[in-house]
Structures are given as C-alpha cells and as structure tokens.
Amino acid sequence: MRIQYFAVTLSIISFVSCKNLPPQENQTSITSKNIEEYALQGILWQQTAGEYKALCYQAFNAAKLQLEKEIENHSASEKPLAIITDIDETVLDNSPYQATQAKAGESYTSETWTAWGNQESAKAVPGALEFFNFVKSKGVQVFYISDRYDSQNEATLNNLKKAGFPNAEADHILLKQKGVDKEKRRQIVLEKHKVVMYLGDNLSDFSKIFDKQTLDARNSLTENEKDEFGKRFIVLPNPMYGAWQTDGIYEGNYNWTPAQKDSIIRAKLNSY
C-alpha cells in the first residue's frame, strides 16, 4: 500500500514539474513552420489594415507638431537641429520580406534579409515621406541609424533615394558595425547636432536603457519614460518582429526548439 502511494505521489510530482518546462521536440509535432506561421496575422494586419496606416499618420502628425515647437524655441547660438530615425518599419516597410518568410515557414536569416535589401524595393511607411520632407524644408538634418549590416550600405542608400527620402547620403546613414552599438552612433550625431527627436519601432531606437532588457524591465522602463512618447520619442507600429520578442518573450535565447517556442508563447498569453 505504501509502495503504491509513493508511486502515485511521485507520478503527480513528475507531471507537475514537467508541465512547467518547455517541451522537447520529441514530445510534440510542432515545427519551425508552425512557429513562423504565427506571424501571418501580424504581417497581414500591417499590409492591409487601415488602423496600421492611421497609427503611422498619428505618429508623424505628433512628430510634426513637436518639431515645430522645437524649431520655434531653437536659438541660433545652439547646435543645428537634427532628428535620428531608425530605417526598417520606421521609414521603410519590409513586410514583403516577412510575408515571404512566414508563408514558406522559414525564419529570418542574414542571407535572405540581405537578398531582400539588395532588391532596393522597400516602400515608404505611410506618412514617412511627407514628414521627412517637411523636416528637410525646415532645415533640420535627418540621420538614419539602423542595425542593418554595414555591408548593406549601398543598397540602403539606393532604396532611400528611390523612395525619395532626404539626406540619403553616406555621412547621414550609420549602419551596424562590430563593436559600435546604436548608442555610440547616436553620440556621433550628438557631437555636432542638437537631436530633438528619435523615431523608431523598437524601444532600443530611443535609448540604451532599453537594450537587452527582460520583458518586465522593458515594460517598467516604458512606464518610467511615458512622458517622452509622442514628444521626444515617436513610436511606429510593428507587430511582426522586434526586441519585444527576442529579448522579451524568448529571453534573449536564440536556441529554443520550435516546441519550446510554442510552449513559451502559450505560457505568456494572458487568458482566463
């Protein structure tokens, strides 16, 4: 009787313990294709929803109003005014790349991403071109700071030029180089300019305080900085990818199996 009781107890403990762990691949039929297909709804929303366009226009309308205030209060004795902006999902829409990968059930790779960039065919995010040409008309410089690979510099320049963006010049585009994070590149611009606004789709586009933070920390820091959003920090919507997922949901770990990713995603959902 004691042996039976012990066996039953041990089984319950084992079940409860295993339930809280991400499953292994051999415990489920979940594949990479399943995980990538989860992105389809977000991509479809970005490509088709009027609400997506509305949020972009809202962001750029707020940016324009704020910039007008900064110009009005700017003194001739100060450094010249500048704006720092991210590129992907802030000025250029890369949803065709995301859609291609998701439909094929394939994740991001540097090779496919570079191949997409080399097409130089990304279109402007709704409202972006109008806003940045307004910035140019006011004599304010635009600097593009992106974590695109430095090897993509020529293709990125060409794409920005084709789309009609101002300051699409080598000295105004600072892409990713080894050992030079976004904060170091921002400091390069700040040496000679008064940066009055940052635009991006990822919190790390605004400040180094958001870099490599956990999910809870990202949300806590956002709460602390809430007065900056819509003023100094202008956020563009991106439901497709970002540090909210890689650093937040997946905790900075790029080695989860598809089954583990599926378990993590479901565990993070707030249901009733």
Image (tube, rainbow, N blue to C red):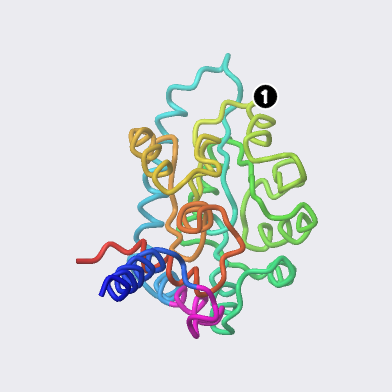
- The reply to whether residue 129 is in sight is no
Which residue is at the front of the view, 8 or 134?
A: 8
The residue labelled by disc 1 is: 191
Quadrant holding the C terminus: bottom left
Which residue corresponds to the image point at 53% horizontal and 59% vertical from the top-left?
89
Q: Secondary structure at mark 1?
A: loop
Q: Point out residue 19 in the picture as x, y percentages from the top left corner.
A: 37, 68
Which residue is at the front of the view, 189 or 220?
A: 220
**266 to 148, vertically: above or below:** below
Q: Residue furthest left?
A: 272
Quadrant holding the N terminus: bottom left
In the image, is residue 232 part of the stretch drawn in magenta? no
Q: Point out residue 137 in the picture as x, y percentages from the top left corner.
A: 55, 41
**58 to 223, vertically: above or below:** below
Which residue corresponds to the image point at 47% horizontal and 73% vertical from the top-left?
39
In the image, is residue 33 part of the stretch drawn in magenta? yes
Q: Point out residue 77 in the picture as x, y percentages from the top left corner.
A: 58, 14
Which residue corresponds to the image point at 54% horizontal and 48% vertical from the top-left?
132
Q: Quadrant of residue 106?
A: bottom right
Residue stretch in magenta: 24-40
Which amino acid type is shown beneath numbered disc 1? Glu
**250 to 234, vertically: above or below:** below
Q: Is residue 177 left or right of residue 55?
A: right
Which residue corresponds to the image point at 39% horizontal and 56% vertical from the top-left?
57
Which residue is at the front of the view, 180 or 117?
A: 180
Q: Residue furthest top?
A: 77
Q: Point out residue 22 in the picture as x, y percentages from the top left corner.
A: 46, 67
- The reply to whether residue 228 is in sight is yes
